[in-house]
Image (cartoon, grey):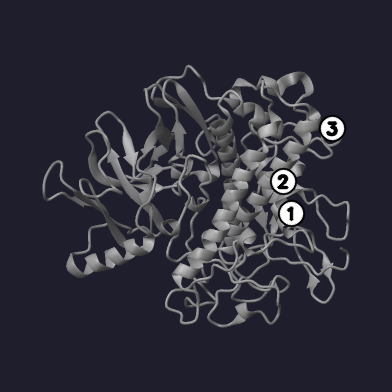
């Protein structure tokens, strides 16, 4: 292994290592530190004390593990020249010399409109969905690997069964996190271009999104993302190992960049910089794209928030798969360095479960740190049928926010769920929205829907035959009550947004058309037609007002 020439196509995994014929890596254990900041038992970026029932322990030398629970995911300062080095699950896709292929790093989905010789949108989308589906498959593999942790009697399995099963789950979960974290480093989701240069393959547009993407919606009770979920301008970088003669250096390709030439202009990656493993705060970005504005910091912030969201999703999937009585035992065993010690994981803390006797059909919430800090929400469904719901908040200037990444199927008859909403997942007008995320929204018709490209084409056609709608929301229902209604939204904000129609009732219920979220750049507009004759966008099952939209988080 000591003679292997490493790949370095991801957020950094190792330290500053010399590679013969190539140079210094200038990495800073970025994957490890992102994951520690997200899942460790410490105060986060906003100073919130982490719920001790919802973080991964990191005490070495326990009798039930050769490494701590946290280190089985994060590793500890891995080195390609130390055979005893601990790469953790999150480092495995970069472990030299057998690094995992492009889908594990969200590479090669490069796209730039109207540039001859570049990928078409369809080809780039296909490459991106390979990455999305790779992560989705690993998520499901982790859930399945967890099964032996709890035995047929509902108790933790013996250590000889529990320990290897836990190791497999955390390694697989870590490999998935690597892919998702790389999406934010390797794509233009979180960043902006150089404002002083024209858009080109060397300076591609940026989406400047400050919350995680809807693409990695891995929960068992949610649809698999497809081409309709990919924003038209979204791109990752072209990458291959044949540096410096890479085909990605062709002038029409959006390039990841040479991992050993941090100063190379035109590279899309934001892989390198310093990250505090406790707070997630960043400094000293090294790559060309990472140095623009706060691109590196924003990519890391989204990666930290995504990592926390995936842990919440995994806990929910364990409940969904193995039952709400067993699910918390699985989660406790994964987080605890000594899950069988004292039997505490056989009787998890009530804090790990939603209250069984909370108020019916409404959300309860708390925000112990005050505005701008983590929100804890629970929901209890006392109807006789399951509901599909997510947190919902209202901000200033008539803005509404639906956390559609957190749509959950809650069984009837008193079924419950719990959300942890990290400050990194708050809307962009934070902290004003902080104390207003207190309600839920029904995630309505979460399957199917037209592609953003089709929506863009429809908007262009509409512009040719109709006046441009006013800023914000407007609607038309020429046939009157009970007939199809068309909702328009024109984005006049300085921020690109994802929006969907929102239906409301007089009983303080609301329905977000969560499959219809569309990405709109500043100045663009789109429309949806809802009602009879439109199977993808029917009316909700009760009388509603359909005049507004919601931002999709």
Q: Secondary structure at mark 3?
A: loop
Q: Residue furthest front?
A: 152
- The relative height of residue 408 versus residue 232 in the rendered view (above or below) is above
| Mark toward the viewer: 2 or 3 | 2
Q: Nearer the viewer, residue 243 or 410?
A: 410
Residue found 38% across the figure and 24% down from its top = 361
In front here: 296 or 105?
105
Q: Position of residue 96 (x, y in %)?
A: 79, 62
* Residue lying at the far left of the rendered structure: 479
Discs 2, 1 touching: Cβ within 8 Å? yes
Q: Label 3 belongs to which residue?
A: 62
Q: What residue sits right under mark 1 in the picture?
A: 92
Dot 2 corresponds to which residue?
Answer: 171
Q: CA distance from mark 3 to mark 1?
A: 23 Å
Local packing at callout 2 (Cα closer than 10 Å; few below 14, some 14-19, many 20+) is many
Q: Residue 31 location in percent, x, y? A: 70, 53
Q: Earlier in the sequence, mark 3 or mark 1?
A: 3
Q: CA distance from mark 2 to mark 3?
A: 18 Å
Q: Residue at x 46, y 19 (%)?
A: 358
| Relative vertical location of residue 293 with respect to residue 509 in this rendering, above or below | below
Q: Local crowd at mark 3 within 10 Å, few (<14), some, or many (≥20)?
A: few
């Amino acid at each position: 292994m000591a003679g292997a020439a490493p790949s370095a196509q991801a957020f950094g995994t190792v330290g500053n290592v010399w590679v013969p014929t190539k140079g210094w890596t200038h990495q800073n254990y970025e994957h490890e530190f992102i994951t520690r900041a997200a899942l460790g038992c410490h105060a986060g970026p906003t100073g919130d004390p982490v719920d001790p029932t919802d973080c991964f322990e990191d005490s070495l030398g326990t009798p039930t593990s050769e490494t701590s629970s946290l280190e089985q995911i994060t590793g500890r300062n891995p080195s390609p020249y130390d055979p005893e080095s601990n790469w953790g699950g999150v480092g495995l896709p970069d472990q030299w010399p057998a690094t995992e292929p492009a889908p594990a790093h969200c590479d090669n989905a490069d796209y730039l409109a109207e540039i001859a010789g570049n990928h078409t949108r369809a080809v780039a989308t296909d490459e991106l969905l390979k990455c999305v589906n790779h992560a989705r498959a690993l998520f499901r593999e982790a859930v399945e690997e967890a099964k032996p942790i709890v035995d047929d009697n509902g108790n933790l399995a013996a250590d000889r069964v529990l320990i290897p099963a836990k190791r497999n789950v955390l390694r697989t979960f870590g490999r998935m996190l690597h892919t998702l974290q790389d999406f934010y480093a390797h794509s233009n989701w979180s960043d902006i271009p150089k404002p002083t240069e024209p858009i080109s393959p060397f300076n591609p547009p940026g989406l400047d999104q400050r919350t995680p993407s809807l693409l990695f919606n891995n929960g068992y009770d949610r649809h698999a993302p497809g081409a309709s979920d990919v924003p038209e301008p979204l791109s990752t970088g072209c990458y291959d190992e044949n540096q410096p003669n890479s085909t990605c250096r062709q002038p029409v390709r959006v390039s990841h960049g040479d991992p050993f030439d941090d100063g190379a202009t035109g590279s899309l990656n934001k892989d390198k910089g310093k990250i505090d493993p406790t707070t997630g705060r960043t400094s000293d970005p090294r790559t060309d794209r990472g140095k623009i504005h706060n691109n590196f910091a924003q990519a890391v912030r989204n990666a930290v928030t995504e990592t926390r969201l995936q842990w919440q999703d995994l806990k929910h999937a364990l409940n969904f798969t193995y039952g709400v009585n067993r699910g918390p035992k699985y989660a406790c065993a994964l987080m605890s360095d000594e899950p069988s010690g004292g039997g505490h994981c056989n009787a998890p803390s009530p804090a790990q479960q939603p209250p069984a006797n909370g108020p019916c059909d409404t959300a309860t919430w708390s925000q112990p740190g005050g505005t701008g800090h983590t929100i804890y929400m629970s929901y209890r469904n006392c109807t006789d049928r399951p509901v599909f719901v997510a947190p919902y908040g209202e901000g200033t200037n008539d803005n509404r926010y639906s956390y559609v990444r957190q749509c959950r199927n809650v069984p009837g008859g008193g079924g419950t769920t719990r959300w942890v909403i990290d400050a990194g997942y708050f809307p962009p007008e934070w902290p004003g929205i902080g104390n207003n995320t207190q309600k839920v929204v029904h995630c309505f018709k979460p399957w199917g829907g037209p592609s953003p490209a089709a929506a863009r084409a429809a908007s262009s056609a509409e512009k040719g035959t109709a006046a441009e709608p006013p800023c914000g929301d407007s609607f038309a229902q020429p046939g009157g009550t009970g007939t199809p209604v068309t909702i328009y939204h024109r984005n006049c904000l300085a921020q690109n947004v994802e929006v969907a129609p929102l239906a409301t009732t007089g009983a303080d219920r609301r329905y977000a058309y969560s499959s219809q979220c569309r990405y709109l750049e500043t100045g663009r507009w789109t429309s949806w037609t809802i009602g009879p004759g439109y199977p993808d966008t029917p009316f909700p099952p009760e009388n509603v007002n359909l005049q507004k939209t919601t931002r999709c988080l």
